[in-house]
Amino acid sequence: MMTHTQLKTLITEAVLLFILSIALVIGGYFISSENANKRLQNLYHSRFDVVMDSASYEKVNSKALNSYPEIKGFYIGYDADGAPDGYVVDLTVKSLYGQDLSMLVALDYENTRIRGLALNDNDDENAFVISNSDMDMIKEKLIGKQIPVAFVKEEKTDNDDSDKITVPGLNDGVYYAQRLYDDRSRYIDYVEMEIKNGVIKKVKWDAFSTDKTNQDRSEASLRGAYLVSGLDWATQSYNICHALLECQDPDRLAMKSDGTTDIVKGVTCDIRPFYELAMECIANSRAGYDKDKYMIGLDMILLHLYQKDSKDLEYLNDDGHVVFSFEETPEIYTTYNDDNVVTGYLTVMQIEAKLRGNTIPDSNNNDDSKDKDDNNQNNGSIDYDASEDGLNSGNSYDDQIITNSLDDLPMSEMASFIEAVPERYDQTRTVVKACNTCYKFLKEYLNWKVT
């Protein structure tokens, strides 16, 4: 018969044995799990390091993937500190002729710039084949670009700008537009634009103060007297002007509903004044309404209101700007409906045409206003010519057709523009399609709000 002491010893040994067994099982599980994770990470590194060399990778499952059957896998890369480093997308897209292109696309985590591109091995008979040399040339075009991506035509020579035109119908000259009212800081924004061969060559965005003792906004910002978030305002103005010279179309700056843009590096300020005034300069160019005519138009408005021009009223500063806000006479530039609700604002060109009794030119360059009353429009001092139909003198219309969308994305949403690799358009186009598919997925996955 077992004594109480023996029974106690037996129970203790059994408990210890049980605990040891559990420890061995758990330890074996973790060792096995760690080995499995190491094998998985080794697999990821063997596949993904060619496009993005991260310390580790994690596969992500998302409901958003249900809408994108092209995407076979979506991964986040992490650096050695465990911080997100970028995205890797494994996907297969159709070429223009229905063949399958399987590839990896790596994107930066913060700004979704293309970080790496690589072709997957594909022995399928329907595979779209891109040679290594062709892929290298395509990568030179795309690496470092922010998605989504669209195409621009390659310029033929340094002096031939016809293929750079993205806004048709522009007449050469210097064009100008300023806001008719000042902002809270008593600044009046203006944009001056020079166009050569139908291409925007120079752009300036600044603002002068209605207080003549104050500096222009750019100079004030450089001296610390005018502050905005991010870089100084003068630098942001330069950056947005440079971006317009690159893309040629204000719509491609992707201004959001709050007046900001996410696609121009270093620009955090409200670009709405720049966008609206640049669009007005474009409308003026199409109508042949250059800076000299614009200044005459301003004087005509002042004469209508005060029976004196800018010089007599001493509103003309040393730089030739009309330093005057029409804020107290909004009826001169505002349009209303029958219920006295504001429906829009007129430009100086439209106000002058109205004061002269002419048909008000459509700022969007629609032909309807011209066709309704050709005779009326030619009675005033505003010149109208054949460029109003959307054609640029000296260039064929076919060369200026602009695609409104690419991969079901509006051109206004495009962040980067590239030229296709010469004689390799189909290959370049298919890789761009893969990059834009990544953008559309991320837009849904990250719940981006693009306006």
Image (cartoon, rainbow, N blue to C red):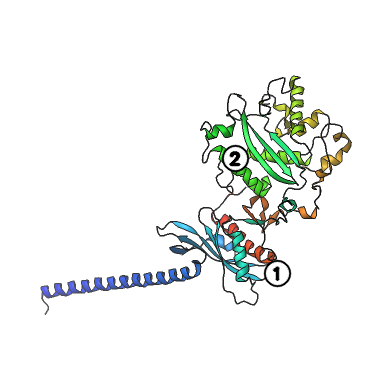
Q: Secondary structure at mark 2?
A: helix
What residue occupies the far bottom of the structure in this picture? 1
- What amino acid is found at the position of numbered circle 1 in the picture? Tyr
At 76% from the left edge and 34% from the top edge, which residue is drawn?
A: 349
The residue to which callout 1 is attached is 97
Using residue 402 as the reference point, say whether residue 145 is left or right of it.
Answer: left
Relative image position of residue 65 (x, y in whole percent): 56, 62
Q: Position of residue 231 (x, y in %)?
A: 52, 41
Q: Identify the image quadrant of residue 129.
A: bottom right
Task: Name which quarter of the figure residue 431 lies in.
Answer: bottom right
**Place of residue 26 in the rendered image (x, y in percent of width and height, measured from the top left):** 31, 70
Residue 434 sits in quarter: bottom right
Q: Is residue 214 above or below residue 157?
A: above
Q: Secondary structure at mark 1?
A: loop
Task: Name the residue rendered at 67%, 39% in the picture.
Answer: 276
Task: Identify residue for label 2.
Answer: 237
The residue at 50%/67% (across/down) is 48
38 lies left or right of 74: left
Q: What residue type is disc 2 on?
A: Ser
Q: Nearer the viewer, residue 268 or 9?
A: 268
- In the rendered image, is residue 254 in sight? no
| Earlier residue among tags 1 and 2 | 1
- Residue nearest the viewer, comparing 8 with 145: 145
Using the image, determine if residue 141 lies above or below residue 369: below
Mark 1 vs mark 2: give the one in front: 2
Nearer to the camera, 268 or 70: 268
* Alpha carbon distance from label 1 to label 2: 44 Å
| Residue 219 visible somewhere in the drawing | yes
Indicate whether 80 appears above or below 278.
below
